[in-house]
């Protein structure tokens, strides 16, 4: 596996198969755009297929705040330590930031607690009609 903390050499053709359980999945081109518009990214590529098999991204003001909205690993690559490596490296990249937030379903809280993340309260809005990243307006 190859870890990259940039998008150098990453194309939309390498981003297939993500967002599996989403009602309105972003297509690979939109996926690449959301990575390009991030403050930090991490990708793990399968060295044989040259496909991205896991990714993480963060949005930050670069001073006090960062938010990790996505960590995804392709289903066939889960339980191989890929997500763990992505989280570990991203938190290391953000270790000079005061506040790193992320939201996850309750089922994933124990996973993130292994990295020193503490459970907190949060509220949010989900506009599922816009989930694909392609505006319907």
Image (spheres, rainbow, N blue to C red):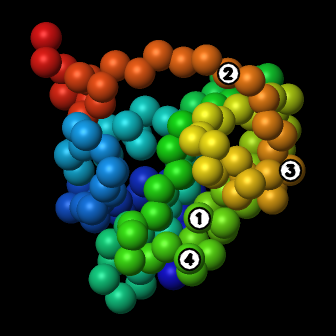
Q: Are marks 4 and 2 in contact (CB under 8 Å)?
A: no
Please rate how many residues cluster around mark 3, counting C-alpha atoms within 10 Å: few if below 14, some from 14 to 19, many from 20: few
Q: Earlier in the sequence, mark 4 or mark 2?
A: 4
Tell me the distance, in whole angstroms, between the alpha carbons under discs 4 and 2. 28 Å
Circle 2 sits on which residue? Answer: 122
Quarter-wise, where is residue 123 in the image? top right
Badge 2 element: loop
Circle 3 sits on which residue? Answer: 116
Q: Is residue 65 above or below residue 17?
A: above
| Residue nearer the viewer, 134 or 23 | 23
Residue 2, image x, y percentages: 52, 77
Tell me the distance, in whole angstroms, between the alpha carbons under discs 2 and 3. 18 Å
The nearer-to-camera label among 2 and 1 is: 2
Mark linked to residue 79 = 4
The nearer-to-camera label among 4 and 1 is: 4
Badge 4 element: loop
Mark linked to residue 83 = 1
The nearer-to-camera label among 2 and 3 is: 2
Q: Is residue 104 above or below residue 89?
A: above
Q: Are marks 3 and 1 in contact (CB under 8 Å)?
A: no
């Amino acid at each position: 596996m190859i870890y990259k903390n940039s998008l150098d050499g990453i194309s939309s053709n390498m981003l297939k198969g993500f967002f599996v359980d989403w009602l309105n999945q972003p297509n690979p081109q939109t996926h690449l755009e959301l990575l390009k518009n991030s403050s930090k990214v991490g990708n793990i590529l399968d060295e044989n297929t040259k496909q991205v098999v896991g990714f993480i991204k963060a949005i930050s003001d670069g001073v006090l705040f960062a938010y990790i909205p996505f960590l995804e690993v392709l289903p066939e690559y889960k339980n191989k330590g890929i997500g763990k490596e992505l989280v570990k490296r991203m938190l290391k990249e953000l270790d000079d930031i005061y506040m790193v937030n992320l939201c996850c379903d309750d089922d994933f809280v124990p996973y993130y607690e292994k990295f020193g993340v503490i459970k907190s309260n949060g509220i949010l809005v989900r506009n599922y009609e816009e989930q694909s990243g392609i505006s319907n307006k």
